[in-house]
Amino acid sequence: MAKNLRLKAARAAKDMSQKDVAEAVGVTRQTINAIENGDYNPSINLCIAICKVLDKSLDQLFWEDENATG
Amino acid sequence: MAKNLRLKAARAAKDMSQKDVAEAVGVTRQTINAIENGDYNPSINLCIAICKVLDKSLDQLFWEDENATG
DNA sequence: ACACAATGTCAAATATACCAGACACAATGT
DNA sequence: ACATTGTGTCTGGTATATTTGACATTGTGT
């Protein structure tokens, strides 16, 4: 799966570490890391929680890339 | 969990049954039924697939209800 | 050189999304 | 009366998301 660079960028914009986000949404640091690196396919509730912490919408962070080739 | 009435409405607007949507996105009918009834917490990839079939965005179908009583 | 924060990654265990198959019930049509 | 479609729900199984704990690396500051 593709990396989620928008998530990484939104986190950087809030000056939060992976650990900070993980604690804010109630999951482990490895889970946030895996999502950013595209290692798996998180649940919608977790995505919503992340969006709220980072002040973004689902479409902004998780909708598929507009400029995907193909 | 709360029912997803927006999903049900979007499906009705396309005149598709739960079975139709299930086959279009490659899951079983029970999975679509469970999501509409709030029985669990689907993965983001499944949500995206459903959105595409129903011509809706993630925010339109899965963003949390603003006027939830709390 | 040492400590420390942030990240990447691995392995084993647990929780849960999702499947496969079935049964029930209401509404529709023949 | 009978079949069909759409939905709700249950049970038992498999796949995978997520946890816990650990170790290595890079960068920053002392």
Image: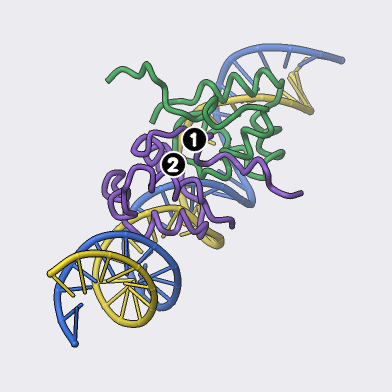
Chain colours: A purple, B green, C blue, D yellow
Residue under label 2, please give it.
A47
Apparent side of residue A33 relative to residue A59 in the rendered image (left or right) = left
- Viewer-closest of A53 and B49: A53
Q: Are marks 2 and 1 in contact (CB under 8 Å)?
A: yes
Apparent side of residue C25 relative to residue D10 in the rendered image (left or right) = right
Q: Amino acid at mark 1?
A: Leu
Residue A58: which disc?
Answer: 1
x 52%, y 43%: residue: B44
Point out residue C4 in the picture as x, y percentages from the top left corner: 18, 67
The chain containing the residue under callout 2 comes to: A
Q: CA distance from mark 2 to mark 1?
A: 7 Å
Point out residue A49 in the picture as x, y percentages from the top left corner: 37, 38
- Viewer-closest of D9 and A65: A65
The chain containing the residue under callout 1 comes to: A
Question: Which SS class for mark 1?
Answer: helix
Point out residue C19 in the picture as x, y percentages from the top left corner: 61, 50
